[in-house]
Image (cartoon, grey):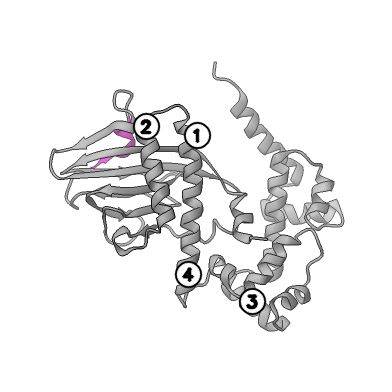
Amino acid sequence: MDVLSDVLKSVRLKGVLSGQIQLSAPWGIKVDSSKHANFCFVKRGSAYLTLQSHGGPVAITGGDFLLLPRVRGYVLQDRLESPTVNLFDLFSCENPPETTTFGGGGAATTLIMGCFEFDCDDINPLMNVLPELVHIMGDHGELEASLDTTLKLIASETNSKKPGTEFTVSRLTEVLFAQVIRKLAKDMVKCNESRSWLKALTDDQIGKALTYIHANSSQSLTLDDLAKQSGMSRSAFAAKFANLTDYTPAQYVTLWRMHTAGQLLKEGKHKVAAIAAMVGYESEASFGTAFKRVYGCAPRAYAKSKSTESDRLLVPAL
C-alpha cells in the first residue's frame, strides 16, 4: 500500500485552465482571492510575487515554479512600482489565454499560468498540509527532471492548439500536482523541525502505521495494533503520531474512514449500510453518527447533495 498514491487518487482536479502570457516591461498582474488553486512557471525573464495575505515580495526568475493551493490574492510585477491589471481582464474573446500579450514593450518575461479546483473533501489529509505558497527555484537545481519535463509538456500543449489539448493539459496538471507533492514530502524529510502528515509518511515508524491504516481501514484498528506495526510502545507511538500528524491515531482513523465514505457516497454505487461496513462500522447507526460529526449532515443527505451537483452539471444550457 502506497499511502500517498491512495490519498492522491481521491484528489481530482477540475476546471483546469492554462495559458502562456508574453509580458514586456513595465507590467503588473493582479489575481484576486478565489477558490481556485493557481500555478505559474517562469519560462523566461524575472518578476516579483507579492502575496496579499502576508510577507514581502518574492523574487522569481526563469525556471522557477510557483503553486498557490489557496489563492488569497497576489500580484506579479516586473518592478514593484509597476501598475497592475486584473489577470482575467486580459483574457478577452479577441485575445484568448493561449496568446495573451501585455506590457510596455521593454524587457520580456514569459509565464505559463494555470488554475484549477480541488475536487475532494476538506478532510483529505493532504489539503491540511499544503502551504499557501510552494516556490521551487529552477536556478538552484530544485526543479527535478521529471517536474521540468511535465512543465515543458504543459507549455508545449498550451501553445499547440491541437485537438485534445484541453484534456491533455488537465491530465498533465494532475501529474504536475503529484510531482510537486512528492517533492514537498522529500524536502520535509530534510527539515528536522517540520511536523506534517507528509513527513509522517516517510517516518520509519509512523509511516508503517499509516500504511497499515490505509490498507485495513475496513477492519477493527486499535492502538495496540498500530503501535505493534510501528514497533513502539502504546504511549510512545501515540505521542509521536500526534506530534507528526496533529491527530491522535483514533482521530486519523476516523477521518480517513469518513473521507473514504464520502468518496463512496459521491459515486452512488453502494447503499449506506454497505458503505458503513466497508469503512469498518458494524452498524449503520454508529456510522451515521460518526459521519454527521465530521461532515455536519447525515450520509444520505450528503449523497443527495452530491447527486444534485452532478445532475446540475448534466443539464444542457438552454
Q: Which mark is residue 167?
A: 1
Q: Amino acid at mark 3?
A: Gln
> Mark 4 or mark 2: which comes first in sequence?
2
Which quadrant, please, contains the C terminus? top right
Q: Is residue 193 visible?
A: yes
Q: Is residue 157 above or below residue 151?
A: above
Residue drawn 62% across and 74% down? 242
Q: Which mark is residue 205?
A: 3
Q: Which mark is residue 188?
A: 4
Please name the residue shown 73% across and 50% down the image.
261
Q: Looking at the image, is mark 2 or mark 1 nearer the viewer? A: 2
Which region is colored magenta?
84-91
Of pointers 3 and 2, the one earlier in the residue sequence:
2
Q: Circle 1 — which element?
A: helix
Question: In the drawing, does residue 295 fall left or right of residue 163?
Answer: right
Disc number lying in front (3 or 2): 2
Expressed as whole percent of the image width and height from the top left, the position of residue 287 reads 80, 54
